[in-house]
């Protein structure tokens, strides 16, 4: 083995390996998503037993092998053990881990994604915040860092920044009133074939009406720093609109059903 390195990260997957070992996946600040083994971590008296559970956040000392790391020591700053006393919030947390695992690439820059995941799991501990809103915020910000954020600051057709009234899933952004009418077949479109959608059932199903508060909420999530994301609440009406936009938009970029979705409360 070569020299050791220090990886700052959070455990997003953990599974038994062999008789006493553990195989973990870390989302790290330095190298994105990495696979690591913790030898003997499942032995009853192992110092690594508690340090290799899901959600553990801290510094991991490891050797880098050809295909995986070997963790030899861990300095855990946050275990998030309180999650295990609240099953509903724990399921949300597991969903966040699975979504991070889906989007984050191995050996990539992981600073923003790790900060987002850490703050999101922390937000689950704020009793005044609804986990379902935390979920939608996390999903949208994940897409921002993945580089596929929707356009919610200007009309995707004409660039107008006022009078934004609808979100079109197929167009991946908002439209002003005039362009929305044109898209629905009231007036002919320009020559941009890629952004033109015929006024049929598919078009109507992809349209989501936006009020001012819902539009602002989407803009705020996309433009805010991680530290300011989980500082607001919304009305039920705004939540439903924002949830529909984010949920349907996310499906454009997730090509399979994530397993943890089945465990979220009330089908959220």
Image (spheres, helix red, strand yellow):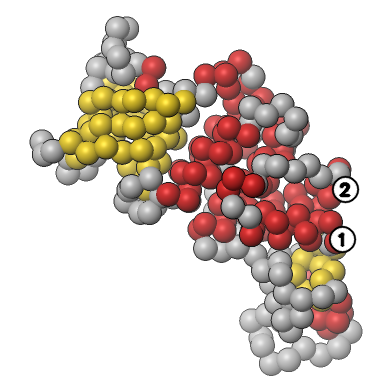
Indicate the secondary structure of the residue bearing disc 1: loop
The quarter in which the N terminus is drawn is top left
Residue 86 vs 192, above or below: the answer is above
Assess disc 2: are there few (<14), some (14-19) or many (≥20) residues with their C-alpha within 10 Å of its C-alpha.
Answer: few
For the residues labelled 1 and 2, the Cα–Cα distance comes to 10 Å
Which residue is painted at 69% across and 34% down in the image? 131
Q: Position of residue 210 (x, y in %)?
A: 84, 62
Q: Position of residue 158 (x, y in %)?
A: 74, 84
Q: Position of residue 107 (x, y in %)?
A: 32, 51
Question: Which residue is nearer to you in this view: 42 or 114?
Answer: 114
Location of residue 268 by image quarter: top right
Residue at numbered disc 1: 211
Which residue is painted at 58% across and 38% down in the image? 120
Residue 189 vs 68, above or below: the answer is below
Location of residue 82 by image quarter: top right
If you read the primary sequence from the N terminus, does the residue marked by circle 1 or circle 2 appear first?
1
Residue at numbered disc 2: 237
Which residue is painted at 63% across and 31% down in the image? 124
In the drawing, what numbered circle is on residue 199?
none
Look at the numbered discs 1 and 2 and tell me whether their residues touch, using CB distance below 8 Å: yes
């Amino acid at each position: 083995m070569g020299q050791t390195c220090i990886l700052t990260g959070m455990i997003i997957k953990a599974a038994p390996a062999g008789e006493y070992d553990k195989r973990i996946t870390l989302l790290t600040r330095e190298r994105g998503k990495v696979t690591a083994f913790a030898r003997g971590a499942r032995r009853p008296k192992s110092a690594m037993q508690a340090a290799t559970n899901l959600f553990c956040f801290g510094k991991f000392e490891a050797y880098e092998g050809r295909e995986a790391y070997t963790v030899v020591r861990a300095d855990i700053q946050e275990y998030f053990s309180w999650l295990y006393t609240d099953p509903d919030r724990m399921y949300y947390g597991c969903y966040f881990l699975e979504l991070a695992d889906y989007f984050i690439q191995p050996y990539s820059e992981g600073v923003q994604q790790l900060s987002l995941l850490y703050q999101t799991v922390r937000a689950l501990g704020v009793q005044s915040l609804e986990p379902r809103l935390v979920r939608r915020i996390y999903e949208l910000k994940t897409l921002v860092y993945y580089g596929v954020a929707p356009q919610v600051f200007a009309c995707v057709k004409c660039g107008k920044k006022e009078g934004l009234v609808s979100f079109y899933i197929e167009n991946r952004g908002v439209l002003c009133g005039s362009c929305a009418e044109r898209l629905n077949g009231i007036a002919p479109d320009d020559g941009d074939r890629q952004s033109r959608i015929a006024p049929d059932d598919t078009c109507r199903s992809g349209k989501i009406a936006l009020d001012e508060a819902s539009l602002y909420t989407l803009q705020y999530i996309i433009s805010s720093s991680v530290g300011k994301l989980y500082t607001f609440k919304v009305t039920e009406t705004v939540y439903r609109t924002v949830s529909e936009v984010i949920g349907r938009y996310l499906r454009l970029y997730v090509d399979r059903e994530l397993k943890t979705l089945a465990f979220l409360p009330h089908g959220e």
